[in-house]
Image: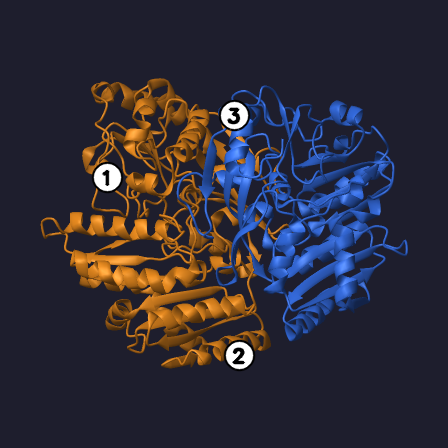
Chain colours: A blue, B orange
């Protein structure tokens, strides 16, 4: 089924006889457990329905290709603030990611630490629930506390509470210039300490990552600032002074080089095309190195850190339960890439505490009483 | 505003209920004397008042859980209360309810500069969160006008904003985790010092749910390093349209100020008379503030004043010192107090798409004549969050009703142009009956379903947010 309007989508869901597998561009189908059901594609519902650059607002149908949104925003010198990851490299998938897929999976990137996640920029949704009813929540204004915030609830619910038909975002101006302070050769603890100092400075850092194996094999720590030309020069210089105790640093200003460097982090490019399992952990930034050490103890092949140390990516042997490395640390780990058997055995998402599981199940039973929307996708 | 009739069976059991509350809380934490419960009879929406059956002031999460479990078992409605600064009636009691106040929960549990978070009990006031970290150069970003008094608990319940959210976002964008107690008395943890908790975004759902899904006792909040400096510029224009166009052009130019505040002539005059801030007597006034180092501020203000000059401002005043900055903000910060000096007023909170600003202001002016009540406009222009203040005389029979009818028309206008009923104050009882102007019954029904999951007996702040007739059967069940 490939509805071309919300009315057709509502009809398709209402008349479904069994489970539905919901698909946008199909580039991230590996994110979550496999679903068996009739295919319901959102790619037929396309088009930007409203774009008001002076109000920093864009509204688009859920099946609109992300590339179309990016192009429309770029033409006005704006962008989606949250820098969504492109999973095609990691999963080896083809096709075009849709904006609805980005929302359904709450996909963000390095700028998440400064500009927020996809859920923070999302200001309105339209969706069809499991009974086939079309529902609106939020709208097209960036401050809105009218009723419950189902916008946040829908974001990251992986299609299990409703099928998105339209999404609205608060967008931001694209920055004129980018500068990246690079520190080489640091161990994990020093690197995360440096990132913490940078993020605790007044210099408005928009990216803070540490690769334990940079392109030349040596560790590299990356700190990004964005803005007007002179301001970027000033802040990179101030950051270099602030981080002098970690050794000599360099500043990269080339637009192509800096963009490529952060795309490498954003898309976990270092892990593309390898057979091993890929894990992604969100922890308190200061706990990053502790987790990294434990992951190495479990045989991690490669590790890198984003979000100032709070996001830890690890390449693990097939079937290894990397979640064991968490110990008592606060946070959670997601199995991003593995065989179906491993994903079923270890669970893609961290199991919820009993009380939260009851709430989640309660919500699912209200939004999708027949249990037909991507059943089992979140475990 | 209509409120449900109290449940007589609860009123009849009052002494027994007081005894049970005293069995689980210290003596001084249970307030039942009418002379004292009167202190809880209203919030900042003072037109509506009703003393609760009792007020309780627990000192820790376990006590909150005990109270909620008892009220759940006894089927007693609970109205959670932060500092009682809601302008929407979010903490208005009914005669058969227990007010659960978090005022005694005011500790800082942990300030973690390495990870840029602070953990506090939620009775702590907004400003004192910043107060706890500012000596280390940090601050908590959301800054509602009531920040001196309002509690974090209420900020979370209403998803409060403030003047600086164009850059820093509102409460939900700065809230990382909570300890929440469910109506059944179960203590749950959502999120924490890590980003993007696993599973559904229940934290996002909870924030802004107006105390209807759970009671939050502890919160993990994001703190930020203070910018090196900040400086405002004041601009006066001879029409609202031109000021509106200037706002739009600033945003389109790629400059992101931390605040863009807008005042119209009635508001400017009242503020000037009250605060003597030295404001020009113009049709519309903008205060635009930017942050950064001295050079960065100069660069941004240069771009902004260039844009402003293209719109022929009557006045353009860049601050050259801390004293001048304070003077520019002085009138704006005094706006609500100034209006209160000259009249009773009702403060609205609708949000509109920024580009609809001139049209909406013109329509409000026309309606003001139709209803025969004056309006002063002061609002956060960068994000379209309006605060029309309708002036009325509470002692004049019928004036409040006319004011409410006028307010409802303004909010419907906000919805009509693509906006919403409330940007940061919440629905409470004030905008409850307008919800169906913004949402269909299906849009409302699924929200009621959400409450069913968290609070199946509909005991937590039950008469708020949704039109009473849409919740009647659920509340009676």
Looking at the rendered image, the quarter that the C terminus of chain A falls into is top right
Instruction: Measure how far apart labels 3 and 2 are at the Cα level.
Output: 57 Å
- Vertical comparison of B323 with A332: above or below: below
Image depth: mark 3 or mark 2 in front: 3
Mark 3 element type: helix
Q: Which mark is residue B302?
A: 2
Give A51 or A290, whichever is nearer the viewer.
Answer: A51
x, y (%) of residue A325? 76, 34
Tell me the distance, in whole angstroms, between the alpha carbons under discs 1 and 2: 51 Å
User: Of circles 1 and 2, which is in front?
Assistant: 2
Determine whether, in the image, residue A244 is placed left or right of residue B355.
Answer: right
| Marks 3 and 1 belong to one chain | no
Quarter of the rendering containing residue A317: top right
Whole-percent x and y of residue B28? Answer: 31, 33
Label 2 sits on a secondary structure element that is: helix
Q: Which of marks 3 and 1 is in front?
A: 3
Q: Label 1: chain? A: B
10 Å crowding of disc 1: few (<14), some (14-19), many (20+): many
Q: In this view, does A34 lie above or below B465?
A: above
- Return the disc, 1 or 2, that comes first in the chain's sequence: 1
Q: Pick the residue in front: B431 or A328.
A: B431
Q: Residue A61: x percent and y percent?
A: 56, 45
Q: What element carries label 1?
A: loop
Residue at label 1?
Answer: B41
Chain label for disc 2 = B
């Amino acid at each position: 089924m490939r509805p071309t309007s919300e009315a057709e989508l509502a009809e398709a869901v209402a008349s479904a006889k069994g489970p539905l597998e919901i698909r946008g561009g199909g580039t991230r189908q590996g994110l979550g457990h496999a679903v068996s059901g009739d295919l319901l594609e959102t790619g037929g519902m396309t088009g930007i329905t409203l774009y008001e650059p002076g109000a920093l607002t864009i509204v688009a149908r859920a099946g609109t290709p992300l590339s179309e949104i990016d192009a429309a925003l770029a033409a006005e010198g704006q962008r989606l603030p949250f820098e969504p990851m492109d999973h095609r490299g990691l999963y080896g998938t083809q096709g075009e990611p849709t904006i609805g897929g980005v929302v359904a999976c709450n996909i963000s990137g390095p700028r998440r630490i400064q500009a927020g996640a996809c859920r923070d920029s999302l200001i309105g949704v339209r969706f069809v629930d499991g009974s086939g009813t079309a529902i609106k929540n939020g709208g097209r204004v960036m401050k809105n506390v009218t009723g419950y915030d189902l916008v946040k609830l829908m974001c990251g619910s992986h299609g299990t509470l409703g099928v998105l038909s339209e999404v609205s975002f608060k967008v931001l101006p694209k920055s004129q210039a980018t500068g990246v302070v690079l520190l080489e050769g640091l161990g994990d603890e020093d690197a995360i300490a440096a990132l913490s100092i940078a993020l605790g400075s007044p210099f408005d850092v928009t990216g803070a990552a540490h690769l334990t194996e940079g392109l030349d094999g040596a560790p590299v720590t990356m700190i990004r600032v964005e803005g007007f030309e002179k301001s970027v020069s000033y802040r990179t210089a101030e950051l270099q002074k602030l981080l002098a105790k970690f050794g000599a640093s360099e500043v990269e200003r080339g637009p192509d080089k800096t963009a490529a460097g952060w795309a490498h982090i954003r898309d976990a490019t270092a892990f593309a095309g390898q057979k091993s399992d890929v894990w992604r952990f969100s922890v308190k930034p200061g706990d990053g190195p502790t987790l990294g050490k434990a992951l190495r103890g479990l045989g991690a092949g490669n590790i890198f850190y984003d979000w100032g140390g709070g996001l830890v990516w690890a390449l693990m042997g097939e079937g290894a339960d990397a979640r064991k490395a968490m110990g008592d640390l606060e946070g959670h780990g997601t199995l991003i890439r593995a065989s179906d058997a491993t994903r079923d055995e270890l669970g893609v998402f961290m199991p919820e505490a009993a009380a939260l599981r009851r709430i989640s199940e309660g919500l699912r039973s209200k939004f999708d009483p027949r249990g037909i929307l991507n059943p089992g996708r979140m475990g | 505003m209509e409120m449900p009739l109290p449940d007589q069976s609860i009123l009849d059991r009052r002494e027994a209920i007081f005894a049970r509350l005293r069995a689980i809380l210290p003596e001084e934490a249970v307030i039942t004397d009418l002379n004292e419960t009167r202190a809880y009879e209203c919030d900042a929406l003072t037109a509506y008042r009703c003393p609760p059956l009792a007020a309780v002031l627990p000192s820790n999460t376990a006590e909150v859980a005990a109270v909620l479990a008892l009220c759940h078992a006894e089927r007693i409605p609970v109205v959670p209360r932060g500092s009682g600064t809601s302008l929407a009636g979010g903490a208005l009691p009914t005669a058969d309810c227990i007010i659960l106040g978090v005022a005694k929960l005011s500790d800082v549990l942990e300030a973690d500069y390495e990870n840029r978070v602070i953990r506090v009990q939620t009775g702590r006031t907004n400003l004192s969160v910043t107060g706890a970290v500012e000596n280390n150069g940090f601050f908590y970003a959301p800054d509602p006008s009531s920040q001196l008094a309002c509690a974090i608990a209420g900020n979370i319940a209403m998803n409060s904003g403030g003047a600086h959210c164009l850059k820093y976002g509102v409460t939900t964008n700065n809230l990382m985790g909570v300890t929440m107690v469910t109506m059944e008395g179960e203590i749950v943890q959502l999120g924490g010092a890590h980003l993007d908790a696993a599973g559904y975004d229940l934290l996002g759902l909870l924030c802004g749910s107006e105390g209807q899904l759970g009671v939050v006792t502890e919160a993990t909040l994001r703190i930020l390093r203070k910018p090196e400096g900040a400086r405002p510029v004041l601009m006066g224009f001879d029409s609202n349209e031109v000021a509106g166009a200037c706002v739009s052009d600033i945003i389109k130019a790629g400059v992101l100020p931390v605040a863009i505040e807008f005042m119209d002539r009635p508001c400017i005059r009242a503020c000037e008379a009250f605060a003597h801030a030295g404001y020009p007597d113009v049709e519309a006034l903008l205060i635009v503030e930017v942050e950064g180092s001295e050079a960065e501020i100069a660069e941004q203000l240069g771009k902004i004043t260039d844009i402003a000059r293209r719109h022929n401002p009557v006045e353009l005043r860049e601050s050259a010192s801390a004293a001048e900055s304070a003077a520019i903000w002085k009138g704006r910060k005094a706006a609500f107090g100034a209006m209160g000096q000259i009249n009773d007023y009702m403060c609205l909170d609708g949000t509109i798409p920024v580009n609809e600003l001139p049209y909406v202001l013109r329509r409000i002016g026309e309606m003001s004549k139709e209803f025969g009540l004056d309006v002063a406009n002061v609002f956060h222009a960068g994000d379209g969050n309006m605060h029309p203040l309708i002036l009325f005389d509470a002692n004049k029979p019928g004036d409040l009703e006319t004011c409410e009818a006028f307010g409802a028309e303004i909010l419907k206008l906000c919805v009509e142009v693509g906006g919403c009923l409330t940007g940061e104050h919440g629905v409470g009882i004030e905008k409850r009956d307008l919800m169906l102007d913004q949402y269909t019954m299906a849009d409302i029904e699924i929200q009621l379903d959400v409450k069913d999951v968290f609070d199946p007996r509909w005991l937590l702040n039950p008469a708020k947010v949704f039109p009473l007739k849409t919740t009647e059967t659920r509340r009676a069940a």
